Amino acid sequence: MSRGFFREKGRVPTEKDVCAVLGKSRECWDGLVMYLLGERKLKAGYKFYGKNYGWALGFTRRGRSVVSLYPDED
């Protein structure tokens, strides 16, 4: 599994930070996030998964983890 870009525990990434890092893949990221929120009705929030993986945008349903997306460069 690849590591995310944001690995500093004390600093939760903002949407602006994530968009700046994603670069040309931002459109795909946005489409996937909108699908998971809209069609699948999942709840989203950033969670820290440790220094090796960093911050991820996690999606849950009924309190259970479904998928986590780790932003990285391009």
Image (cartoon, rainbow, N blue to C red):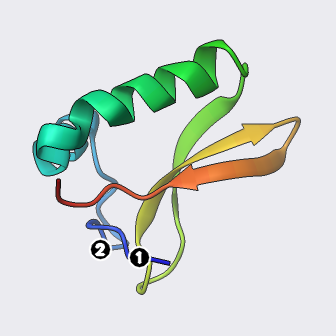
Q: Nearer the viewer, mark 1 or mark 2?
A: 1
Checking the image for residue 2, the label placed there is: 1
25 up-or-down from 71: above or below: above
Determine whether 19 is above or below 53 in the image.
Answer: above
- Indicate whether 15 appears above or below 2: above
Task: State which tag comes first along the sequence, 1 or 2.
Answer: 1
Residue at (28%, 66%) from the top-left corner? 6
Going by the numbered disc 2, the residue's amino acid type is Glu
**Residue extending furthest toward the right:** 62
**Where on the picture, by quarter, is residue 18?**
top left
x%, y% of residue 29? 36, 36
Image coords of residue 53 (percent x, y)? 44, 77
- The answer to whether 30 appears left or right of 14 in the picture is right
Pointer 2 local density, CA inside 10 Å: few below 14, some 14–19, many at least 20: some
Q: Which mark is residue 8?
A: 2
Residue shown at the point (58%, 54%) measured from the top left? 68
Amino acid type of the residue tagged 1 in the rendering: Ser
Asked if marks 1 and 2 touch (Cβ < 8 Å), the reply is: no
